[in-house]
Amino acid sequence: MSILIINIKELIQVRENNVTIVKGADMKILPTIKNAYLIIEHDTIVEYGPMSDFIDYNAEEVIDAKGKMVLPAWCDSHTHIVYAGDRSQEFVDRINGLSYEEIAERGGGILNSAEVLQNTSEEELYQQSLKRLNNVMQLGTGAIEIKSGYGLTVEAELKMLRVIKRLKKESLATIKTTLLAAHAVPKEFKDNKQGFVDRVVSEMIPEVAQSKLADYIDVFCEKGYFDLEDTDRILTAGKAFGLIPKIHVNQFNAFGGVALAVKHKALSVDHLEEMRAEDIEALINSTTMPVALPSCSYFLSIPYTPARQIMDAGLPLALATDYNPGSTPSGNMNFVVSTACIKLRMTPEEAINAATINGAYAMGISNQYGSICRGKKANIIITKEIESYNNLPYAFGDNLIDKVIIRGKVLE
Ligand code: NIG
Ligand code: FE
């Protein structure tokens, strides 16, 4: 199968093969080619350039993108899209005055989702999750990370991870899997958190790693959930089985989790709504990607990640959705990019870099995804007719996507 796209008003995020991350002031630069063409063969981008250099090419499908822009599909490096049911009642409880933390203290929140998931069949969980995955692909997401974490027992975590494995097999999307064994302390371990951490370390991690069901290890490092000592133990145990850390940290409280993650050479540190100077300091000269989740801040009405401070320190930044039933029931990367511009004061160039190449880095796949590059996978968004790429974040809440191509296939 081959696709030729001609008359592209602007081909966005064109990079050399060796660019796998964009940092600091460089994030303001978004390389483009005006009036361009692009050729896809099978699942790969094979050629592109200005129309003036175009020599005839015999493609099976020709798309005329006059007035339209082409950019890499979104790379969403942090989601929990495998879950059962929803938490719309808790949404209403929060409107009526309860906080996210108060709901969790009453046994709602993650424990609520875990109970529903434990009582949902694997087939039903797959069907509910597939619907969400197909929906976010239509919204332009081509590569996505999915976490476990609503199981809380060995058996239910394995069920979630098998569902992710099946999505991986049956969907065109590229999927990376994270074991979030320590997401909350289950009811049975209410007064014995240590016992639960022991189980994560001695049972869950070995079993999941041996069945090759995960790429990464995550912990919710937060007051009332898992402290620095628990996080240290779990990351150490995960690493011993080849699972690289990607952690939830500094969502409500900052107490040293970022430095700990950097010590463990985490691929990413995610949330970062609460950032102290020493947290930013810890990231300098590291290989860890900071990840902001602005639609979580929006939905919970909590502070936004200080993106400007992070980038002004010369650091990279990625953007992801955090799609989950409790804090972010939305997987729309277009809304994330808009919110990053509106609330985190990122420029459109910075936000697009953060949602493509840096998102791919935060999944360990930026050598294959996240930019327009010969040899990279053909995951592409074709926009509707728009004036400039600034319109993507500007027209918040609108859908300016005309077509999505994932691994060389145009989505129906
Ligand atoms: O990333 N913060 C921890 N985990 C999720 C929310 C989980 C939930 O509320 O179900 C998050 O926001
Ligand atoms: Fe999350």
Image (spheres, helix red, strand yellow):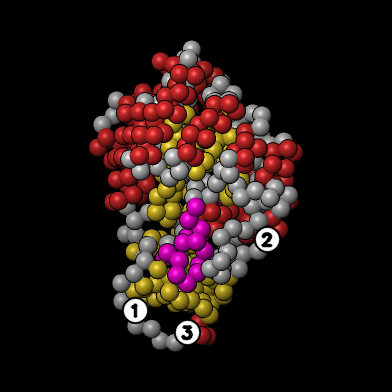
Return the residue found at the far front: 240
Which residue is drawn at the image coordinates 34% and 49% (left, top)?
168
Identify the mark nearer the N-term, 3 or 1: 3
Q: Is residue 120 above or below residue 330?
A: above
* Dot 3 alpha-carbon crowd within 10 angstroms: few under 14, some 14 to 19, many 20 or more: some
Pick the residue in front: 344 or 399.
Answer: 344
Magenta residues, start to end: 364-378
Give the mark nearer the N terminus: 2 vs 1: 2
Task: Read off the residue under disc 3.
Answer: 54
> Residue drawn 39% across and 72% down?
40
Q: Identify residue for label 1.
A: 59
Query: What is the secondary structure assignment of the residue under circle 2?
Result: helix
Earlier-in-chain disc, 2 versus 3 = 2
User: Where residue 262 sits: x, y (%)?
Assistant: 62, 41
> How dense is the environment of label 2, judged by Cα within 10 Å: few (below 14), some, or many (20 and up)?
some
Please name which of the two marks, 2 or 1, marks the residue nearer to the observer: 2
Secondary-structure class at tag 3: loop
Viewer-nearest residue: 141 or 148: 148
Q: Quadrant of the C terminus?
A: bottom left
Q: CA distance from mark 3 to mark 1?
A: 13 Å
Which amino acid type is shown beneath numbered disc 3?
A: Phe
Question: Is 303 displayed left or right of 266 in the figure?
Answer: right
Q: Residue at x 38, y 39 (%)?
A: 209
Mark 1 belongs to which amino acid? Ala
Residue 342 colored in magenta in the image: no
Q: Position of residue 60 (x, y in %)?
A: 31, 76
Mark seen at residue 26: 2
